[in-house]
Image: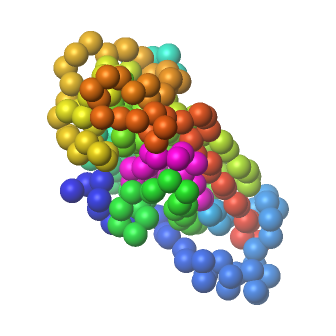
Amino acid sequence: MTRRASLVLGSGLLLSLLAIMGFMATGILSADSGDDQLLVEVSLTNLTPGQILSPVFMARHDGDMDPLYTLGLPASEQLAMMAEDADASGLLTDYDPATNAYVSESMLLTLDDGPIPPGHTVSTQFQVDDDDTYLSFISMLVTTNDAFIGASGLDLSQSRTINLTAYDSGTEANSESCAYIPGPPCGSHAEDDAMAEGYVYVHNGVHGVEGSGLDPATHDWHNPVARMTIKTWSLMK
Ligand SMILES: [Ca+2]
Ligand SMILES: [Ca+2]
């Protein structure tokens, strides 16, 4: 099952923290010194009280790749699969570095081979070349119809912290019916053919629709719902 799959790497190089420590110990790294090889650590923390984040689709790419989504416009089919059912297979196919010239590396980032529970953090590291310094990613809030977090074209060349807002893919009506929600307590992977909102927008939360089985005290949120920390070091020449 794709969303439970272990880390799937493209052609890029994943460096261990041990390697980072080794570079630092020998003085090879310096913070943001502007050289053309970067070592980047990306961490994502779930800040919700009761929403699990699905394994995170990530693509590292150059500046010419199309955005994964645009606020105010309809979602792609690949985003809909991810936002409605945490199914990253479409994204992994479309952004496979073997077939997509803009992509250097794509992966499904997991925590212990699974999703990211509330209050937990998942991290990964990249070695980045001069012209592929951008990161795009998507993760579903799994106890919703079609809520997700993401970013398109994050520049990895500078360290920073980003607070993430929950978006609605606009591809599934927010019935809050367990018949169409993959996360607990529901566990259903069916699609809802009812009229959806039609465009990507800022999600307005879980309201406890009568008979839905969702409890706003657990499943609702106030933005931000997650935080991403990017730490970047330059590899000195
Ligand atoms: Ca759904
Ligand atoms: Ca929706």
* Left or right of 47 in this view: 103: left
Instruction: Tell me where residue 81 sits by quadrant.
Output: top left
Q: Position of residue 226 (x, y in %)?
A: 58, 46
| Front residue of 138 and 224 | 224
When the figure is inspected, residue 23 is found, relative to residue 33, above or below; the finding is below
Q: Position of residue 71 (x, y in %)?
A: 52, 22
Q: Position of residue 176 (x, y in %)?
A: 32, 28
Which residues are drawn in magenta?
42-64
Kindly identify the residue that appears in the image at 73 percent across and 65 percent down: 233
* Left or right of 173 in this view: 155: right
When the figure is inspected, residue 48 is found, relative to residue 55, above or below; the finding is above
When the figure is inspected, residue 80 is found, relative to residue 86, above or below; the finding is above
* Left or right of 22 in this view: 181: left
Is 49 a magenta residue?
Answer: yes
Kindly identify the residue that appears in the image at 62 percent across and 50 percent down: 228
Quadrant that contains the N terminus: bottom left
Please state the quadrant of the image where ligand 2 appears: top left
Kindly identify the residue that appears in the image at 76 percent across and 87 percent down: 26
* Left or right of 195 in this view: 58: right
Instruction: Tell me where residue 214 sits by quadrant.
Output: top left
Is 131 a magenta residue?
Answer: no
